[in-house]
Image (cartoon, rainbow, N blue to C red):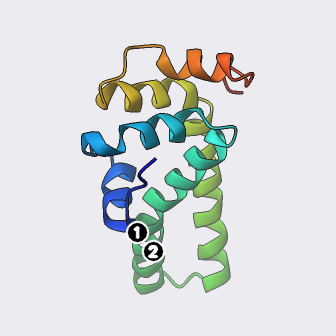
Amino acid sequence: MKRPGPVRWLHYVYGGVLPEEYREWVLHDATAKTWVLRFALRICAEALPWLIAGYVVLRLVTPMPAGMIVAALLISLLLSLFLTVTSADELAEVRLAKHGFPPGTGKAVRKRRGGASTWP
């Protein structure tokens, strides 16, 4: 199974479609036992630039202490994680469909492998 390098992985994180040679890895990514953790880590990677930008802007335009800004941004990240992880099953299916898999492939593979077919 060929894994994407860092640049291709970032392209994948932000919704890009990987070349055909990574198709097996995409299926693994959406169906491995750790698929929900992998999903959550992608959300964190996707949010990181926005969190950094939010920190910089809030430090420049507000008198808030750095600790308070970090706490507020962490709360926003946790809320984002909660809202997206509750839809992880459907979002994984969309990602698989973008890579040419038939609808329901992820759920079927996870069920066949003995994992949960839905999350949470």
What residue would you read off at disc 2?
A: 52
110 horizontally vs 10: left or right = right
Quadrant of the image occupied by residue 111: top right
Instruction: Say if 62 sits above or below 44 in the image.
Output: below
Please give the label number shown on residue 97. none
Residue 36 position, x and y percent, is 64, 40
Disc 1 residue type (three-letter) = Pro
Residue 62 position, x and y percent, is 47, 80
Please state which of residues 103 and 90 is positioned toward the viewer in this rendering: 103
14 horizontally vs 54: left or right = left
Please give the label number shown on residue 49. 1
Residue 83 position, x and y percent, is 58, 37
37 horizontally vs 63: left or right = right
Instruction: Say if 63 sits above or below 80 in the image.
Output: below
Quadrant of the image occupied by residue 6: bottom left
Labelled pair 1, 2 in contact (Cβ < 8 Å): yes
Residue located 56% across and 26% down the image: 89
Work out whether residue 106 can be spotted: yes
Disc 2 residue type (three-letter) = Ile
Residue located 46% across and 77% down the image: 58
Q: Residues within 10 Å of mark 2 (few under 14, many from 20)?
A: few
Please state which of residues 111 and 45 is positioned toward the viewer in this rendering: 111
Instruction: Say if 66 sits above or below 111 in the image.
Output: below
SS category of the residue bearing label 2: helix
Label 1, label 2: how far apart the Cα atoms are: 5 Å
Residue located 29% across and 25% down the image: 100
Instruction: Say if 114 sits above or below 50 in the image.
Output: above
Work out whether residue 65 can be spotted: no
Q: Which quadrant of the rendered structure holds the C terminus?
A: top right
Q: Residues within 10 Å of mark 1 (few under 14, many from 20)?
A: few
